[in-house]
Image (cartoon, rainbow, N blue to C red):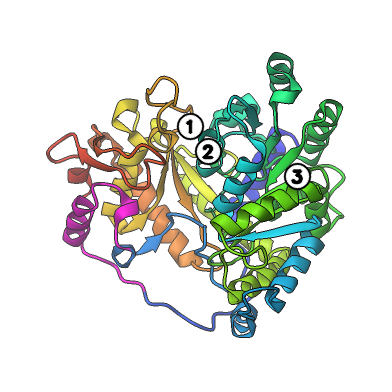
Amino acid sequence: MSTSETSGLLNTLASARHPAEPWRIKTVEPIRMTSPEERKAALEAAGYNVGLLPAELVYIDLYTDSGTSAMSDRQWAGVMLGDESYAGSRSFYRFEAAVRDFYGYDEVIPTHQGRAAENILSRCLIRPGHHVPGNMYFTTTREHQELNGGIFHDVIVDEAHDPEADLPFKGNVDLGKLEQLIAKVGADQIPYVSLAATVNMAGGQPISMANLAEVRELTRQHGIPVILDAARAVENAWFIKQREPGWSERTVAEILREICAQTDGATMSAKKDSFANIGGWLAVRDPHLAEQARNLVVVYEGLHTYGGMAGRDLEAVAQGIEESVQEPSIRTRIEQVAYLGDRIARAGVPIVRPVGGHAVCLNATAFLAQVPREQFPAQTLTCALYLDAGIRSTERGAVSAGRDPATGHNRYPSLELVRLTIPRRVYTQGHMDVVADSVIRLHEGRKALCSGVEFTYEPSTLRFFQSRFRPLAAEPLFGAVGR
Ligand SMILES: *Cc1c(COP(=O)(O)O)cnc(C)c1O
């Protein structure tokens, strides 16, 4: 699909409301709007890190789509059916069958969440000095690669780093970059290629089937395995169906199987596509690797038939996998995100184009052009959004990128984003409108936000979770927002 066709898609959505949900609401959970004074005090107490706020003081929580989905009545019914046997529980076999059927890998190892699968995989395959190429980094994925002595190489297409490049498959691998790396370090120093579908850090951008096939062919020639980060592979499959020639008549379930068929294994966070509140898995084709992984899973997670999950969690994941590929469900999900993105973009707010699968990403360097990178514009904007309307978003910029392990310097990625991540089946169009109104209001008043924040506490790994900050001006951004 050409750039103009993608914008056409966006324009059609602009005029529409998002489609009515293919479900109705059976249980409700109250949320509360706070006063500006309450929010000011809460943010200060949280060290200007919205991740440290008590969730009760958040009105609309767009911190993550991870584990925050609303489970279906059938998933809750599965919770009651969970078999809590320590070894060989019935729920494990149902879970294993769901992963085999829908993803197509034979060897299935449950883990308590995605990063646990990454830990086990990285320990099995990475040795000090190894090089691991990937289509952009993900925080926990790269952390486990580096903890095992691996060196990460970003081989995504250049356009993925450009928020304005309105292209259908900004998650694609640049084959030239991958070939160059193989030529430079040698195939035997590359334990696997790490492929994400969709690419979280690029704002949920998909990889095309054609690109996957090209990566498969190149790695096959060199005997390098490909491991998929399948957290949002269903969302990726939906984009392939919508955007890639030749796939519109195939079902999302078929496309998902075909994505996986191009790879040798996958790590999965079932807290994303699969609507589970906890859970994950590692799946591979090679029985020897699976055996090695099962030996490690008992050390870090639990027996290989529960891997850190209760039987009821295994049931919820198995049921969630089946629901995730249902097309009215995935369509509503993607179009709700597009609706929010489009309302914001039409008001002239700079966002990453096109809108991705799970989030709308504000381009913080353009939004707060007057705040220097060293003062963390994205972190600053997450604070402003909370103060304005009690909305919690995530920083995905320099704070998340951390420091270079070799030099110790801050990494300043080209994308300095604020991610508005939409939980699945949780918020309504009314909530999306509150979010859009707040973002647009802040953008109109952005000139008043002229300085950012600095660290008062900086942890050494995955610093964004625990770090604390202070505003650099006495009445910072925050003056502009105080309504
Ligand atoms: C969330 C996520 C992970 C890690 O999974 P957890 O379940 O949070 O441990 C890995 N990769 C991607 C792309 C993710 O979005």
Position of residue 27 measured from the top left corner of the image (x, y, whole percent)? 49, 82
Q: On residue 243, which mark appears?
A: 3
Q: Residue furthest left?
A: 474
Magenta stretch? 31-54
Determine the residue positioned at 23% across, 37% down.
448
Label 3 crowd (10 A; few <14 / some 14-19 / many >=20)? some
The answer to whether the residue bearing label 2 lies less than 8 angstroms from the nearest atom of ligand 1 is no
**Above-or-below relation of 355 to 180:** below
Between 361 and 437, the one lying in front of the other is: 361
Secondary structure state at the residue bearing disc 2 = loop
In this orientation, does residue 356 appear?
A: no
Q: Which mark is residue 205?
A: none
Work out whether residue 270 or residue 69 is closer to the camera in this orientation and state it.
270
C-beta proximity under 8 Å, tags 2 and 1: yes
Residue 403 position in % (x across, y down): 40, 29
Q: Judge whether residue 306 can be spotted in this image.
A: yes
Q: CA distance from mark 1 to mark 3?
A: 24 Å
N-term-proximal mark, 3 vs 2: 3
Q: Is residue 468 above or below residue 373?
A: below
Residue ID for mark 2: 352
Q: Residue at x 81, y 57 (%)?
A: 106
* Dot 3 amino acid type: Arg
Q: Nearer the viewer, residue 313 or 8?
A: 313
